[in-house]
Amino acid sequence: MSNAFFELKAGEFLPAPHACSPWSTDMLHGRLLGGLAARCLEQEHREDGLRFARLTVDLFKNSPLLPVQVETVRVRDGRRIRVADATLRTARGIVGRAAAVLLREGEQPGGERNTTPAWDERPPQGPPGPGDWTPPFDLWRLTDWGTAQPMRAWTRENRPMVGGEELTPFTRAALAADFASPLSSAGTRGVEFINADFTLTLAREPVGELVGMAAQGHLSADGIGTGDCVLHDTEGPIGYCVVTAVANPVPLSGR
C-alpha cells in the first residue's frame, strides 16, 4: 500500500489518513495544499528556460480529509514572464488558491551586491531526533524550542506527495515553505499562530533532498502576525518565505 499523502484517481487527489494537520487529526494539512498547487502548476505551466521565481499560497479555510480538485489557468504569457493561478477545492468549496510567477533564465549580471550569506549549519549526519511532535517529514531542530530565539531547522520529505510520482525540487521547496509559519512564530509557549498564507520566492531550486530554514523575525499585534525565513540547501541560500498568520487559541507546543 502506498505511503503517499494522496492518490490521484479520476482527476481528484484522495488524501490518506496521514495527510492530516497537527492542529486536528480530521483536518487536511495546509502544507499539502501548497504542495498540490506547486505540483499542478509545474506540470501544466513549466517549460525549459522558465523558472518558478514566486509562489503565493492562500489558505482560505480548513477542510476535512476530503478529495481535492486542482484547476490551473495561465493568466499571462510573455517573453520573459509567465503567470499562472491554481484553485483548490473540496466538497466544502474553495479551500485555497495559488499564484505563480515564472521568469526566463538569462545571463547573470556581474558586480557585487548585498547577498544573503550562507548559514553556518552543517547538514545532518544522523536520523532526526525525538520530539514532542512527530511531523510527517524528517525534521532536525537546530535551536532549542520553547524559547524566543530565532529558530532554525533542516527538513526532508520522507514520502511521496502523490502516489507513483517523484517529488520535484520546486514541489519540495513548496512543501518546506509552509514550515516558515511555526519557525517564525514559535515562542516560549509554543506555536500560537496559524498561517493564512505563505509566499515563497526562489533564486534557484534546492539541490538534493534537504531544505534548511532560518527564521529571521516575527511581528504581531492584536492577534495578527507576520514572519519570514531564509531557505537553504546544502550549497547555500536559495530563497525566502514570508507568512501572515492569525492567533490560534490552542497553542501547538510540540512543533
Image (cartoon, grey):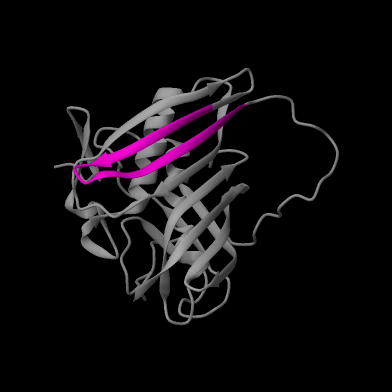
* Residue at the right extreme of this rendering: 111
* Residue at the front extreme of this rendering: 222
Q: Main secondary structure of the magenta part?
A: strand
Whether residue 180 can be seen here: yes
Report which quarter residue 33 is drawn in: top left
The residue positioned 49% from the left and 65% from the top of the image is: 183
Whether residue 124 can be seen here: no
The residue positioned 31% from the left and 34% from the top of the image is: 70
Rendered position, 187 above or below 11: below
Out of 206 and 16, give the one closest to the viewer: 16
Residue 130: x %, y % from top left: 34, 71
* Residue at the left extreme of this rendering: 1
Residue 168: x %, y % from top left: 42, 35
The residue positioned 55% from the left and 71% from the top of the image is: 220
Give left or right: position of 226 versus 1: right
Give left or right: position of 250 versus 84: left
Check if residue 88 falls in the magenta segment.
Answer: yes
Residue 129: x %, y % from top left: 38, 69
* Residue at the top extreme of this rendering: 79
Rendered position, 82 above or below 198: above
Out of 157 and 62, give the one closest to the viewer: 62
Start and end of the magenta stretch?
83-103
Out of 234 and 44, give the one closest to the viewer: 44
How many discs mark residues in the rendered view? 0
Instruction: Quarter of the image for the N terminus: give it.
Output: top left
Check if residue 98 falls in the magenta segment.
Answer: yes
The residue positioned 57% from the left and 59% from the top of the image is: 228
Give left or right: position of 186 versus 122: left
Instruction: Quarter of the image for the C terminus: give it.
Output: bottom left
Rendered position, 63 above or below 79: below
Residue 225: x %, y % from top left: 52, 66
